[in-house]
Amino acid sequence: MLVRIGMGALALLFTVSSLSFGADGDKPKPIKAMLITGGCCHDYAKQKEVLKKGIQQRALVDITLVHTADTTTKARFEMYEKADWAKGYDVVIHDECSSDVKEPQYVENILNAHKNGVAAVNLHCAMHCYRIEKDEWFRFVGIHSTGHGPQKPIDITFLDRDHAVTKGLENWTTINEELYNNVKLFDSAKPLARGRQDTGKKVDDFIVAWANEYGKSRVFSTTLGHNTATVADARYLDLVTHGLLWSVGKLTPDGKPMPGYEGTGVQPIDINNLTPEPDPKASAK
């Protein structure tokens, strides 16, 4: 049977195809991600390399590193001074720790990019950053957290087993880690995992991973990831990659990358033998 396709339908088909696939027609265009690291209290020099390698092993993601060597709570990133700082990116991975940076316009520039549709992944200390009035940063991440307990193992239990982010993930117990408190869960946030920690004086139980909606974007966050050994744990990298793929709509309902978005293949990451990848954009002020 000969099926005639109108020019309008043909043009639409070509447009959809060209948006999804690269020039060779074989693979989709990589997800464009920006990974921002630096600030207080963590070995970001190593963790940025672990995250880049681990995510790219699991998904087709082109990751631009933006790192500052500033290890204070006032670490700043020059790009945030510009309203269009996230132009051209599908998702931003916030892994900075700048709790004492509170200039309203600076923070609004960050938030506006996400309100307008740039997806986000927030890791660990990103939950404690940019504490401006009206809790707007906390609304963005989805949970208001103000502190954490001691570094002790955390028992991780996944909650919504039907959510794409949790599919295929198994409960586990971390090495010594920080369990962040939950002061408030915003209505837009959906809990995905809880953490239970015996501090020696009491047992704390808080949400440690969740999905959120903010403006036009999807936002995935986890409070886990203080120590580099945790960041390099395959179970942690699986969780973060699931969250990233979900945030940009490239995760299937069964927790797999959409066809063509598979990574290079999972391999153990030796945190004592990391070779930084040259990246001309890997700088910040």
Image (spheres, rainbow, N blue to C red):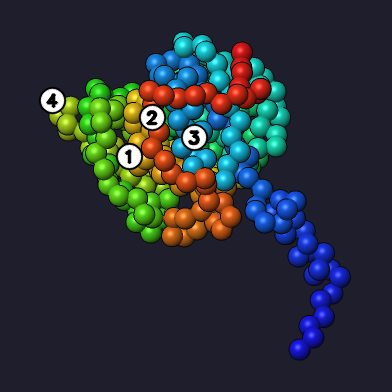
Residue at mark 3 = 53
Cα separation between marks 1 and 2: 29 Å
Please name whichever residue, 99 or 58, is drawn nearer the observer in this view of the structure: 58
Q: Nearer the viewer, mark 2 or mark 4?
A: 2
Cα separation between marks 2 and 3: 11 Å
Q: In the picture, which quadrant includes the N terminus?
A: bottom right
Q: First in sequence, mark 1 or 2: give its number.
A: 1
Q: In the picture, which quadrant includes the C terminus?
A: top right
User: How many residues crowd mark 1 within 10 Å: few (<14), some (14–19), many (20+)?
Assistant: many
Q: Secondary structure at mark 1?
A: strand
In the image, is 177 to the left or to the right of 108?
Answer: left
Q: First in sequence, mark 3 or 1: give its number.
A: 3
The amino acid marked with disc number 1 is Ile
Cα separation between marks 4 and 1: 20 Å
Q: First in sequence, mark 4 or 3: give its number.
A: 3
User: How many residues crowd mark 4 within 10 Å: few (<14), some (14–19), many (20+)?
Assistant: few
Q: Nearer the viewer, mark 2 or mark 3?
A: 2
Q: Are marks 2 and 4 in contact (CB under 8 Å)?
A: no
Q: First in sequence, mark 2 or 3: give its number.
A: 3
The amino acid marked with disc number 2 is Asp
Cα separation between marks 3 and 1: 27 Å
* Label drawn at residue 270: 2
| Image quadrant in which you'd find residue 230 | top left
* Label drawn at residue 248: none
Q: Are marks 1 and 2 in contact (CB under 8 Å)?
A: no
The amino acid marked with disc number 3 is Lys
Residue at mark 1 = 207
Q: Is residue 3 visible?
A: yes
Residue at mark 4 = 201
